[in-house]
Image (tube, helix red, strand yellow):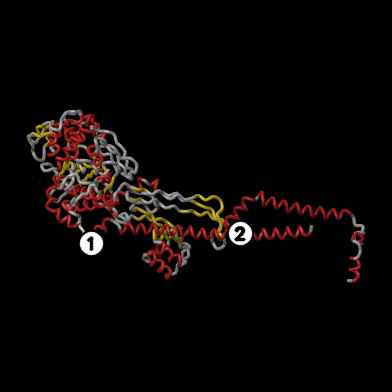
Amino acid sequence: MKGFRGTLAHRFTESPLLQLRLPPWRSRLIAVLILSSFGVLIGRAFYLQVLNNDFLQEKGESRYRRDIEISASRGRIADRHGDVLAISTPMKSIWAIPSAATLTPEQTRQLAALLETDPAQLARKLDTDKTFVFLRRQIPPTVADQVAALKLPGIGQDKEYRRFYPTGDMTAHMVGFTGVDDKGLEGVELAFHGQLLGQPGSRSVIKDRRGQIVEDVGSIKAPRDGKDIRLALDSKIQYVAYSHLKQAIAENNAKAGGVVVLDARTGEILALANWPTYNPNNREKLSGSQLRNRAVTDTFEPGSTLKPFTIALALDAGKVRFDTVINCAPGRLTIGSATIADAHPHGALTVAQVIQKSSNVGAAKIAATMPAQKMWQMFDDVGFGQIPHLGFPGEVSGRVRPWKSWRPIEQATMSYGHGISVSLIQLARAYSVFARDGDLVPLSLTRIDGPAAHGATVFSRQTARDVRAMLEMAVQTGGTAPKAQIPGYRVAGKTGTAHKLEGGRYARKYVSSFVGFAPASDPRLIVAVMIDEPSGGKHYGGDVAAPVFASVMSNSLRTLGVAPDLPLVVAQSAKSPTVKAKL
Amino acid sequence: MLRLNILLVLAAVLCSLGVVTSQHKARRFFQLLEAEQERERQLEIEFGQLQIELSTWATATRIEKVAREKLKMRTPEAANVLTATPTGGAAR
């Protein structure tokens, strides 16, 4: 040790080691070896970081980076006041990979109890060659959590949305429904599918060992929730229409029926009810007849409800005037080999009385003064024979044959609504030419907040007002539909009673209808009622459809707070003291 | 020279510790944010479910039933309805 210390005391350059004469190649060799090993390291680094970079980066990311889908919900459907008609809420679906799902009988029993199925049936489902089976779809998230808590092998769950329809069968045809995979299948759900549908977003995240998200990486694609749709529908009016239709169908023992309520000022569809209907929340036993949105997809021969259009055309063309007398005696008219007849024979009637009494002969005689082409043009102008383009599935155009093939008898029958077919919604819309001053309002399923649209003018203002006056007469005493009267309001409307065509012949089955509007002094609502095959002893539109019209119209006007335009002189004087006492 | 080096090493160590703590803080805040966002989603779902409940309770069918049967209400007859028309300055 001492000696060693002694050598340290030497000056460094005097170290005997340095004084050794070593061959110079040895130090060079060492230098070359060190440099070349650096070269290897650089080469390796170049290989890893430049040549093989992408592969390694990907491998690394796959260990901590995850792409997550951000789900977007389907838009809500609400009525004009914002009351929800359709809304989505998340549910879970339980699935299994049968090869991995080896459950003990006890576990199968537990799972079956949670899924509310039979254990044997569940076991059968799991005993299959398929690689993936759904055990149960759309179960509440709380139940799904319980399933997850069982920690069963090969059983997993997914999030999905389920659509609820709080108003149920009342608005079924209007709102429609979606399938399990959130695709609109009927009604507004289908018509506005593109807008209602949400766009799911996505994001890339870094997850830590415990599976928690610790960082966002890359750009986030934000989800776009579906747009909410605000319908023109008024829930209260819809309820009124639906419940009175249901009641009338039961009273008249009818097969089917429909009611449409339009806002005469804006063309908004305030209510659209059909019977039979279904509950969109439970569609297990659904038949085609329940599913049909009859007001839009079914056509019928409208019968006398078409007479006002014939008369309006003649008035507009100056062929007749309000008080021109038409000889309708003896209640029959023979054209070619066919004879048309009135339900009750009339004598000489004015044009206004032809509407009031609903004379087929009168309408046919007036129609005979006009060329077929003009009549066809008018039917086309008020929307008959044209698809309404509301977006509903299965919308029909109705049938108006080209005028060139009309025979004189056909032109005569068409004047009172036979040999032509229309849908209820077309009929309701067509009456807007009388409820307004001669223009045809475009229909709208959604609420209109801007200024109301104006349609193409079909009749002159004077013609529309004349016909309106005639339609008012039809509802008054002496007309065909005194049952359509509403206390406090002036009502205008027309009945229709048409035989149904069966196998090319008119059967003893009827379609009773009534279309009208009120208050007649400044029309606000148009209500169209159609009752298919009433068989309760009555079949005239004035007996079957008119009372439905009256109750739907009076309740709707009250709901909207429309001021009465008729004084209640007689009744009021007797009852007013009690009213005042209550106030 | 040596002192400067030590100083720089110390600074580097301090900086790296700072990076570590701020990274940790960032992640913690991020998790809080995540949790709150999850809560937001849950509340939105709950809102939707409450809306379903609200509209189920408020269906016209049920309201009419309760009004007629429980509260013994009825539609006033037309004769019992008085319409008030705005007069004077308020009238449009």
Tell me the number on the disc at residue B71: 1
Give the structural element (helix, strand or loop) at label 2: helix
Q: In which quarter of the view is residue A310 placed? A: top left
Rendered residue at 66%/59% (across/down)? B16
Residues at marks 2 and 1, CA–CA distance in whole angstroms: 65 Å
**Amino acid under disc 2:** Ser
Image height check: is A103 above or below A298? below
The residue that disc 2 covers is: B22
Rendered residue at 15%/50% (across/down)? A535
Q: In which quarter of the view is residue A512 placed? A: top left
Q: Position of residue A95 (x, y in %)?
A: 43, 60
Image height check: is A246 above or below B91? below
Disc 2: host chain: B
Give the structural element (helix, strand or loop) at label 1: loop
From the viewer's side, name the closer residue of A181 and A432.
A432
Disc 1: host chain: B
Q: How many marks?
A: 2
Residue A197 left/right relative to A521: right
Give the farthest residue toward the front. Answer: B88
Tell me the number on the disc at residue A307: none
From the viewer's side, name the closer residue of A60 and B71.
B71
Q: Position of residue A176 (x, y in %)?
A: 32, 50
Q: Is residue A130 visible?
A: no
Residue A488 left/right relative to B29: left
